[in-house]
């Protein structure tokens, strides 16, 4: 009986390991394919190989030298960074109010945020474009083909979910900590900034990373609202390589994708401990 249990245990372990490696290979194959394509000298989709025979950096040099790639990358970092920071600030204030205060319309407001979040921004693309087009006539810096206008649109779509997300985390922070700060003479805002926010750092990091990655890779709204090539974000700019001759520019497209992904990897690696803590635990551990 012991040998049978031992045999069954090894069989289950081998099966789990096999399935895990299959999942890892399935996830890594597209990334390795793109990386290999970026170093492939043929620059042709039909001749693409995952491991090129003679790796080259020519696609990276052409991408940076002949195209405004660095401008696209800078625009993307600016739009995604500002949107992420403002989203965290506004959602933290809203989530703290919903978590700590009791006021008329609180439940209705929470349900309204959840209901509005069920409708994607793409459903209102025409209305968003017309709104920014009209707004640009009075405030040119906030209209179509402007980064502030695009940031404003992104903020509208980020508030609902992230406010709910952060509220659940604030609910795990004991009120006694804030009450102690108030007894020591702190104002409610000082208690929020100096007591609650440091404890909520993991969820703040999670929201920053999620929002940054979402905006970093967003294409549809950016392609509609940005018209000038120098105003493009990275995803919209890389679309230029997918035109009629995309088969002859596949290497540059892959090189742009690799360079763009490096920033996301660095951000995720820098905040990985906070992300794990924010997604798996509460603010205060037993």
Image (tube, grey):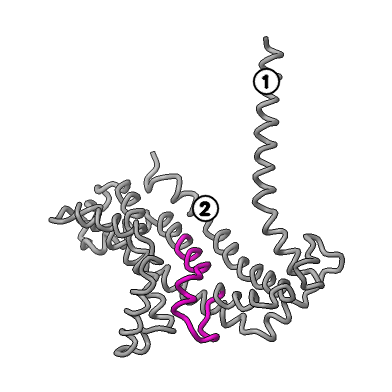
Locate residue 270, reporting x and y percent. 55, 61
Residue identifier under label 1:
8
Q: Residue at x 53, y 77 (%)?
A: 233
| Outermost residue toward the left in this view | 104
Residue 273, disc: 2
Label 2 vs 1, first from the N-terminus: 1
The one of 187 and 211 positioned closer to us in this rendering: 211
The one of 201 and 208 positioned closer to us in this rendering: 208
Crowding at dot 1, Cα within 10 Å, few <14 / some 14-19 / many 20+, comes out as few
Q: Is residue 224 magenta?
A: yes
Task: Indicate the secondary structure of the residue bearing disc 1.
Answer: helix
Image-based side of 247 in relation to 183, left or right:
right
Q: Is residue 48 magenta?
A: no
Q: Magenta part of the protein: which range?
A: 210-234
The one of 176 and 30 positioned closer to us in this rendering: 30
Locate residue 163, reporting x and y percent. 32, 58
């Amino acid at each position: 009986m012991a040998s049978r249990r031992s045999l069954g245990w090894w069989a289950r372990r081998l099966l789990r390991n096999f399935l895990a490696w299959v999942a890892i290979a399935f996830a890594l194959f597209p990334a390795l394919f793109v990386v290999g394509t970026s170093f492939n000298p043929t620059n042709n989709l039909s001749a693409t190989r995952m491991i090129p025979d003679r790796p080259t950096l020519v696609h990276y040099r052409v991408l940076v030298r002949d195209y405004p790639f660095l401008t696209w990358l800078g625009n993307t970092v600016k739009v995604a960074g500002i949107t992420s920071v403002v989203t965290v600030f506004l959602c933290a204030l809203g989530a703290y109010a919903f978590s700590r205060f009791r006021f008329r319309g609180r439940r209705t407001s929470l349900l309204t945020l959840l209901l509005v979040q069920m409708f994607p921004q793409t459903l209102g693309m025409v209305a968003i474009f017309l709104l920014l087009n009209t707004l640009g006539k009075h405030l040119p810096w906030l209209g179509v083909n402007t980064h502030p206008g695009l940031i404003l649109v992104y903020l509208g779509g980020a508030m609902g979910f992230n406010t709910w997300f952060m509220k659940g985390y604030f609910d795990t922070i004991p009120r006694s900590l804030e009450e102690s700060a108030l007894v020591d003479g702190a104002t409610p805002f000082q208690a929020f900034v100096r007591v609650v926010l440091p404890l909520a750092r993991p969820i703040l990091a999670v929201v920053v990373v999620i929002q940054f990655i979402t905006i970093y890779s967003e294409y549809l709204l950016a392609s509609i609202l940005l018209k000038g090539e120098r105003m493009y974000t990275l995803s919209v700019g890389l679309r230029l390589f997918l035109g009629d001759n995309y088969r002859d520019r596949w290497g540059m497209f892959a090189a742009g994708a690799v360079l763009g992904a490096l920033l996301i990897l660095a951000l995720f690696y820098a905040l990985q401990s906070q992300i794990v803590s924010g997604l798996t635990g509460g603010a205060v551990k037993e």
